[in-house]
Amino acid sequence: MTKIVIDPVTRIEGHLKIEAVVENGEVKDAQSSGMLFRGIETILRGRDPRDAQRYTQRICGVCPTSHSTAATLNLDSAFGIADKIPDNGRLMRNLILGAAHIADHTLHFYHLAALDYVDVTAIARYDGNDPTLKSVKEFAQRGELGPFVPRYEGDYRLSTEGNIQALAHYVKAFEMRRKAQELAAIFGGKLPHNCTIVPGGVAEVPTVDKIASFLWKLNEIRDFIDSVYIPDVLSVAEAYSDYFTVGAGCGQLLSYGSFDLDGSNPDLTRRQRLVQQGTTSTNLNADALDTSKIAEYVKHSWYDESTSGRHPTSGETKPHINKNGGYSWIKAPRYDGKVFEVGPLARMMVSYANGNAEAKALVDSVLEHFKASPGAMFSVLGRHAARALYTKLVADAMPAWLLQLKPGEPAYIDYEIPDEATGMGLVDAARGALGHWVEVKGKRIANYQCVVPSTWNFSPRDDNDQPGPVEQALIGTKIKDESNPFEIVRIVRSFDPCIACAVHLVTPKGTDLGKYRVS
Ligand code: NFE
Ligand code: MG
């Protein structure tokens, strides 16, 4: 029996430790641990409610747009204006968030995950004229292949040309991410941490110039998604098709949906959204979302035991360092007491289960390509495919939103901050279901709780000792070489972890992020 400790897992956001117990070449047990704490929720207490939009964006530099959206929906609902946001405001919120999701998913596939499947040393055999690739080749010849190495070396299966093309697309994807960030900044003011998504609507006005510039950049990005991103995911899937049967996880999926198509329903769990809210599982039943079923457990998290099992409206963030039985700063959110995975796979499959025609056509096209059944989506490759298909679904929906904008009409309505109120903001962030809850007393924040995508996916065991989604995805995995457990990082990265979000923290200065322990 060997215990593999990967601490930290690299090429992710934040500080994640994975421990896996391997016996006879198979993972028998696994633990996912978030290793730092900051406590943004605690900092918000006593502040002006409108600070939540600003402060919660600082949870994360990767998905601040999602936090600003969840915080703003939360405040809209607390202020009683959730159904009164002008269409211009709703549409610009969608466009800013859509651009951020495109940037996020491009980042994840090319710059964080795809390298697990690419032999970067193939660049030594490059004989083309691309100046960037020529300079990568020169670095490689000097043995300087950072940031691609060090890493666990995988069983690379792409051809030399395939590997070199993947590296070329790695470089191209930086440009696309920059363009997507510029896109978000057109209506968001700046990126990261936009300043225009605010309660009441958007603090920006649509103009013909901005619409035209957005459309121009968006079309270039859509071309990249169709002609590069999706084909690359399919090429990786063809070469590594066994990963359709690896890393299945808990088999239950939760989505809050994203992109309001109509803002008239104050109930966010019943809104008409581009991507549906609700739950599903391997049976593909579509079940409606009931947020009263959400609770966070802390038996194995470093938080005070008395706060376990609470709904976020009465949740507390009360650290208890080195608690007996604890092994993570991540809480364990559960839905109806059960373990749920969130993220692009959940969004696509909940939409699929709800009969969303576009989502169904996209997922079916991949399944037909691989002659696979929907069950194959519950896997490492299913997650990568779902992420790429979701990116296309959103990018393809955005031109219509742009054309619905009405220059000269309002994008914002005014409001009063109530003395006492409660609010809930639900949206799917790039990495999955993101919920913010607020309690306002004396026009100040009395309590603020965020239940974040990576908190769901990377949760430790709960009070019933049920392992979290990633822990379940790891258990049962075959490991070829315990000293080079590339299978583990491929599974973990397929979830696109963001541990900064999961524990609502930043990495303090001086933390050693380059230490590997393999025992
Ligand atoms: Ni820090 Fe995040 C997203 C949120 S969490 S990346 O997307 O919310 O997993
Ligand atoms: Mg929280």
Image: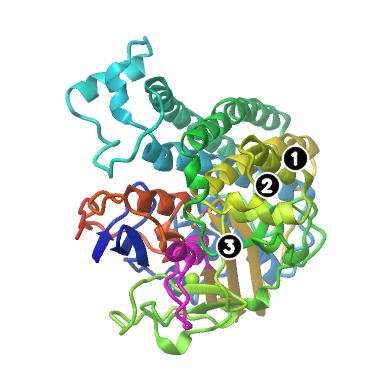
Q: Which residue is mark 2?
A: 94
Q: Mark 3 to mark 2: distance in Å? A: 29 Å
Are discs 3 and 2 less than 8 Å apart at CB?
Answer: no
Q: Is residue 350 above or below residue 362?
A: below
* Residue 431, image x, y percentages: 53, 54
Q: Which residue is mark 3?
A: 251
Q: Secondary structure at mark 1?
A: helix
Q: Position of residue 10 (x, y in %)?
A: 32, 49
**Residue 386 vertical position relative to residue 235 in the rendered view, above or below:** below
Foreground of the two, 112 or 158: 158
Amino acid of disc 1: Trp
- Which residue is at 24% across, 53% downward? 513
Element under disc 3? loop
Q: In the rendering, which numbered label is found on residue 401?
A: 1
Calculate the distance from the C-alpha at mark 3 to the C-alpha at mark 1: 33 Å
Q: Earlier in the sequence, mark 2 or mark 1?
A: 2
Q: Is residue 13 above or below residue 127?
A: below
Circle 2: residue type: Asn
Nearer the camera: disc 3 or disc 1: 3
Give the mark, 3 or 2, whose residue is nearer the N terminus.
2
Magenta stretch holds residue 459:
yes
Left or right for 442, reference 412: left
Q: Which residues are magenta?
A: 451-472
> Is the residue indicated by label 2 positioned so its CB lies within 8 Å of ligand 1?
no
